[in-house]
C-alpha cells in the first residue's frame, strides 16, 4: 500500500458528534484541522441516524442552582464513578451548545419552547431536552467545512504516533483503496465512539446486528492504551433495551408501561400511559437492571412495553420522537405488519452488554498523555456530553497546538512498523480465518467468562482463552480487500479491549451495579468514590486505584 502524509495542527480521529464539534471549535480558533472518519461524517457515529433527547441544564427551566443536576447525573452512571468537576463543566456549558445547535438549524425547541420529557420518574428532575436531531450530522459536517476543516471520509485511524511522552500524529488506512495515511499532528482528539461488537448482540451469530452502529469498536480506547494513556471503568458494563431482536435505541422515548405477561407493572412509577407517563416515561427498566433475567427465571416473563390506550395525539408525539431517535426502520416494520401500538403491547429485551468506561480525561478533555484529548462515548458518553466535550476538546487542543513544536517525522514507535507489516500479511494470505470468525469467537469468550457473573477462576480461564485466540488471529486472519482489512483492525482493537476488561474485572474484588462477583458478593464502601485506572507498562496492562476527591 502507498503511504500518503497529511499535516494538521489538530487531528480529530472519528467524525461523530464529538469529533465534529471538536473540529468546528478548533477550526474557528484558527487551527488547521483534519477529521479522519472511517465512514462518512454526514451519517456516521451513534448520532448518525438522529437523536431526540439532549441532557442539559437550562437556568430558566431548572433554576439558578446547578448542583442538584450534577448530583443527579453522578448517580445515574450505573456504578461508574466520574468526577463531579467533569460533570459540572459539561452541564455548565450545555445550554450554550443547545443555543448554537438551534442557530445552526438543528431544532432544539418543540412548539416554540424548551420541551423536557422522559428518562425520569414522577416528581423527579427532567434533564432530557426533546430536540429534532435527524439532520444533526449533515449540519455539523457543513459547519466544520464552512470553518475550513478538512474531512477525510473512509479513513480509519488505527494507531497513534508517539507514546507516553507525547503524541505526534496517527496512522490511518483507507477503507476502500490501498492507501496508508500518516498524519503528522500537534494534537489528536479521540472521538471514535462506543465499544460495540465486544459482546454478542441480540441475534446470535450476527456480529453486525448491534444497538449501536457496528463500526464503533472502541478504537480510540485501544489506541490510547497502546500509546500509554490511562483508561478507566472498563470492568463496569451497561446495556440498552428495546423491541425484541430489533436492536434499536430510544428506550426513554416510549409512552408506555413496562408490564409482565400477566399485565402487572414492573415498576412503581406509572401504571398507565397517561400524561404522567408522557411527561416522565416509565424508568423502571432503567433502574431494575436484572428485570428481564429475574422475570424469565421466576416465570413472570416476558416483559412488554404496553402503550395500549394511548391517545392518537400522544401516539403521534411518540412516533415523532422515535423517528428523530433514528427508528424509521422500526416504525416502517410496525406499519408493514399492521401492528397498532394503541392495541398491541411490544415485547422488549435487553441488548448486548457494552463497556461503560473509556479514556480517562480531566475537565479540559486532556488525557494522561501530552497532546492527546478525548470526548464523547470515548469517555462517559451521551449526545450532550459528546457535543459539549467535543467543543471543550477542540478549544484546548487548538490552544495546545499553537504552542507545540512541529510533530516529529517518521514512525516514533517501532511496533507500528511491525503492525504495517501485519496488514500486508493479512492481505497476502490465501487461507485463514476471516474477521467475522474471530469476532464471534471473541464474543463467546466474553459472554462465557466475563459476562453476567464473574469469578476469579472463570476470569483466569477466560483470559487464557482470549490470549490463545489473539495469537491465533494474528497468525491466521485474512483480509480479501480493504473493507475486510478495516474489520480486521477493528477486531484487533476489540481483542486488546477484551484483555483489559478481564484485567479490570479481576482487580475489582467486589460486587457493584452490574459488575457481579459471586466470590466477592459485598459492595465495598471503601471504593465508593474510587476509579480503577488501567494502562500499559512494559507491554502489559497494569492497574491503579485512584480516589476521586470532588
Image: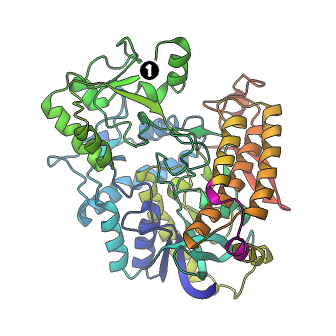
Question: Is 270 placed left or right of 398 in the picture?
Answer: left
Stretch of the chain drawn in magenta:
424-436
Q: Is residue 429 magenta?
A: yes
Which residue is pictured at 36% across the width and 26% down the height?
121
Residue 423 versus residue 24: which sits nearer the camera? 423
Task: State the residue at coordinates (54%, 12%).
Answer: 298
Q: Position of residue 447 (x, y in %)?
A: 66, 38
- Residue 549 position (above or below residue 154): above
Is 310 on the left or on the right of 173, as rendered? left
Q: x, y percentage for residue 143?
A: 33, 73
316 to 166, vertically: above or below:
above
Query: In the image, is residue 14 above or below residue 244?
Result: below
Circle 1 residue: 302
Counting from the top left corner in percent of width and height, residue 85 is at 54, 49
Q: Of residues 466 and 410, which is closer to you in this image?
A: 466
**Mark 1, secondary structure of its residue:** loop
Q: Quadrant of residue 49?
A: bottom left
What residue is at 60 percent from the left and 39 percent from the top?
Answer: 237
Indicate yes or no whether the magenta region holds residue 56: no
Residue 162 showing in the rendered view: no
Q: Position of residue 423 (x, y in %)?
A: 69, 73
Amino acid at each position: 500500500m502507498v503511504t500518503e502524509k497529511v499535516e494538521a495542527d489538530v487531528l480529530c480521529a472519528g467524525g461523530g458528534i464529538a469529533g465534529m464539534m471538536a473540529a468546528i471549535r478548533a477550526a474557528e480558533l484558527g487551527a488547521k484541522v483534519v477529521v479522519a472518519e472511517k465512514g462518512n461524517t454526514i451519517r456516521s457515529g451513534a448520532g448518525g441516524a438522529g437523536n431526540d433527547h439532549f441532557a442539559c441544564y437550562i437556568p430558566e427551566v431548572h433554576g439558578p442552582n446547578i448542583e442538584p443536576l450534577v448530583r443527579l447525573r453522578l448517580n445515574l452512571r450505573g456504578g461508574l464513578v466520574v468526577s463531579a468537576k467533569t460533570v459540572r463543566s459539561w452541564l455548565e456549558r450545555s445550554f450554550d451548545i443547545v443555543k448554537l445547535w438551534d442557530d445552526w438549524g438543528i431544532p432544539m425547541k418543540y412548539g416554540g419552547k424548551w420541551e423536557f420529557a422522559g428518562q425520569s420518574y414522577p416528581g423527579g428532575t427532567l434533564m432530557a431536552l426533546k430536540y429534532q436531531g435527524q439532520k444533526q450530522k449533515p449540519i455539523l459536517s457543513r459547519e466544520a467545512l464552512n470553518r475550513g476543516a478538512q474531512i477525510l471520509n473512509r479513513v480509519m485511524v488505527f494507531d497513534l504516533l508517539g507514546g507516553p511522552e507525547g503524541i505526534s500524529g496517527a496512522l490511518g488506512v483507507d477503507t476502500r483503496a490501498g492507501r496508508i495515511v500518516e498524519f503528522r499532528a500537534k494534537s489528536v482528539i479521540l472521538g471514535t465512539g462506543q465499544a460495540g461488537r465486544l459482546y454478542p448482540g441480540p441475534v446470535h451469530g450476527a456480529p453486525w446486528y448491534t444497538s449501536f452502529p457496528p463500526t464503533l469498536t472502541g478504537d480510540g480506547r485501544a489506541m490510547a492504551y497502546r500509546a500509554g494513556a490511562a483508561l478507566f471503568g472498563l470492568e463496569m458494563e451497561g446495556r440498552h433495551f428495546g423491541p425484541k431482536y430489533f436492536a434499536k435505541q430510544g428506550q426513554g422515548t416510549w409512552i408506555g408501561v413496562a408490564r409482565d405477561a400477566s399485565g402487572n407493572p414492573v415498576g412503581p412509577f406509572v401504571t398507565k400511559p397517561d400524561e404522567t407517563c408522557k411527561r416522565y416515561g416509565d424508568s423502571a427498566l432503567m433502574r431494575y437492571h436484572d428485570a428481564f433475567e429475574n422475570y424469565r427465571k421466576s416465570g413472570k416473563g416476558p416483559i412488554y412495553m404496553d402503550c395500549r390506550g394511548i391517545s392518537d395525539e400522544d401516539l403521534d408525539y411518540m412516533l415523532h420522537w422515535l423517528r428523530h431517535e433514528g427508528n424509521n426502520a422500526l416504525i416502517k416494520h410496525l406499519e408493514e405488519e399492521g401492528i397498532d401500538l394503541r392495541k398491541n403491547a411490544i415485547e422488549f429485551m435487553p441488548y448486548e452488554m457494552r463497556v461503560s468506561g473509556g479514556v480517562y480525561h480531566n475537565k479540559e478533555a486532556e488525557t494522561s498523555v501530552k497532546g492527546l484529548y478525548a470526548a464523547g462515548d470515548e469517555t462517559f458518553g451521551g449526545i450532550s456530553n459528546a457535543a459539549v466535550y467535543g467543543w471543550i476538546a477542540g478549544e484546548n487542543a487548538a490552544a495546545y497546538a499553537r504552542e507545540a513544536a512541529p510533530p516529529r517525522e517518521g514512525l516514533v514507535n517501532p511496533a507500528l512498523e511491525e503492525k504495517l507489516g501485519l496488514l500486508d500479511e493479512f492481505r497476502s494470505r490465501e487461507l485463514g480465518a476471516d474477521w467475522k470468525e474471530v469476532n464471534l469467537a471473541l464474543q463467546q469468550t466474553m459472554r462465557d467468562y466475563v459476562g453476567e457473573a464473574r469469578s476469579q477462576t472463570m476470569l483466569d480461564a477466560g483470559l487464557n482463552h482470549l490470549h490463545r485466540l489473539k495469537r491465533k488471529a494474528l497468525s491466521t486472519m485474512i483480509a480479501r480487500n480493504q473493507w475486510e482489512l478495516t474489520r480486521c483492525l477493528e477486531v484487533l482493537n476489540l481483542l486488546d479491549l477484551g484483555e483489559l476488561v478481564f484485567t479490570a474485572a479481576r482487580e475489582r474484588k467486589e460486587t457493584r451495579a452490574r459488575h457481579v462477583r459471586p466470590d466477592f458478593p459485598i459492595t465495598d464502601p471503601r471504593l465508593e468514590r474510587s476509579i480503577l485506572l488501567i494502562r500499559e507498562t512494559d507491554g502489559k496492562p497494569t492497574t491503579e486505584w485512584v480516589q476521586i476527591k470532588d
